[in-house]
Amino acid sequence: MKLNIALLKGDGIGPEIVDSAVRVLEKIGEKFGHEFCFTPYLIGGIAIDTVGEPLPEETVNGCLRSDSVLLGAVGGPKWDNLPGNVRPEKALLGIRAAMELYTNLRPARLYAALKEDSPLRPDLVEKGFDIMIVRELTGGIYFGERGYREGKYGTEAYDTEQYSRMEIERIARAAFEAARVRNKKVTSIDKANVLETSRLWRKTVHEIAAEYPDVTVTDMLVDNAAMQLVRNPSQFDVIVTSNMFGDILSDEASQITGSIGMLPSASLGATKRGLYEPIHGSAPDIAGQNKANPIATVLSAAMMLRYAFALEEEALAIENAVNRVLDMGLRTADISHGEEALGTKEMTEAILAQI
C-alpha cells in the first residue's frame, strides 16, 4: 500500500513524539512492503507564531486530502493569555469539526509490566483492566451556544449543552460495534437525574441497543462512574458518553493505568481517514530535552494502521514490540522506578529493535 499521512506535530514535545511514530511507521513499511508518504502541516501555537492563526486553511485542506492524520500536541504557557477564539487548543476543535470526526476511541489498559505504576490498591491492580472509552466528539457543551450576559448578580458567562438524537445514535452505534469485538458490554454514562440532554441520551442509547441483542447495556450516572473507575475498573468493557464527560473520565482512566504517557487515541468519522494522537498534552517543561515518552504516539500510529487502513498484523507488530520493551524493564522517566530512564530517542530505538 502507498499511504499519504498528514503530520501535525504542533507544540512542546509534539515534534519529538511524532518523529518517533514516523520512524516506527517507516520500519513497518520496510517489513510489510508499504510506502508511507509524510507531509507536515502547521497547527497550534507554532501556527499562530508563523501565520497568525492556530488552524491555517492549508492545514485543513492537507488533512482532508490525506489518507490519515497523525497529531502530536498543541499549546503551552506562551499562548495562555490569548483570547479563546485564537488559542492553540481552538485548532483541535476546528480540525475535528472540519474532518467530521465525531467518535473518539480512548483505550485505557493496565500493562502487566506497569502494575506498580498504578495508584490503585494492589488487589484492584492484580485483576487488571482493559477499557475502551467511546467519547462523542463534536457535540455537547464544547460546541453549544456560549457568551456573556447581564444576570441577577451582574455579568455572567454561560455555555449550553445540547445533543440531537442523530448525534447520540451514531456514537451509540460506534460503542456497540466496538463492544461486539470485545466483551460485549457497554456502560452508557450520563447525568439523566438532572440534565434533559442526558435523558434524551439514555432513551436513544437504549433504542439503539435493541439493534444489538448480543451486547449488554447498562446505565451509570457520571458521578458514580468517576468513583467506580477507581473502585473497580475491571467491571468496565466499553464506556460510551458525551463530549465533556468523556473528556474528564478518559483522563481519570489514564491516571489509573500509571502514566498518561502510555495512552493513544483515535478520532473517527464516517470515513476511514481519522485523526490519531496521544491523549497527553504538549509538556513544554521537557520539550526538546529527549525526555518525553513516545509510546502513546507510537501506539496511536498502531491504531491508525488498524482503523484507517485495516492493517491488523502491522498494528499488532507495533503493540507487541511495545509489550516486549516494557517486559524487558526498559522505561522512560515517567514510568521509571529506579531503573535507568531512557530518552525519547532511545526508547524509540528499543521499540524499533523489537519490530
Image: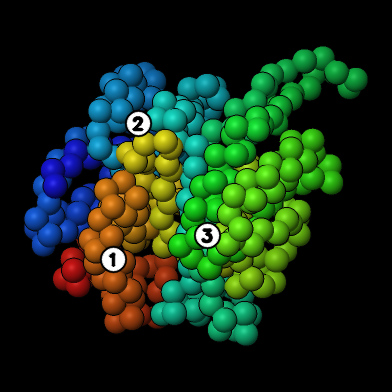
Residue at disc 3, secondary structure = helix
Task: Name the one closer to the observer, 294 or 313.
Answer: 313
Residue 190 seen anywhere in this rendered image of the structure? yes
* Crowd band around label 1 with a 10 angstrom C-alpha radius: few (<14), some (14–19), many (20+): some
* Crowd band around label 2 with a 10 angstrom C-alpha radius: few (<14), some (14–19), many (20+): many
Disc nearer the start of the sequence (2/1): 2
Mark on residue 316?
1
Mark 3 or 2, which is nearer the eye? 3
Residue occupied by mark 2: 43
| Place of residue 45 in the rendered image (x, y in percent of width and height, measured from the top left) | 39, 31
Residue 250 seen anywhere in this rendered image of the structure? no
345 on left or right of 138:
left
120 on left or right of 88:
right
The Cα–Cα distance between marks 3 and 2, rounded to whole angstroms, is 33 Å
| Place of residue 206 in the rendered image (x, y in percent of width and height, measured from the top left) | 69, 48
Mark 1 or 3, which is nearer the eye? 3
Residue at disc 2, secondary structure = loop
**In this picture, is 277 found above or below 348?**
above
* Three-letter residue code for mark 1: Leu
Residue occupied by mark 3: 179
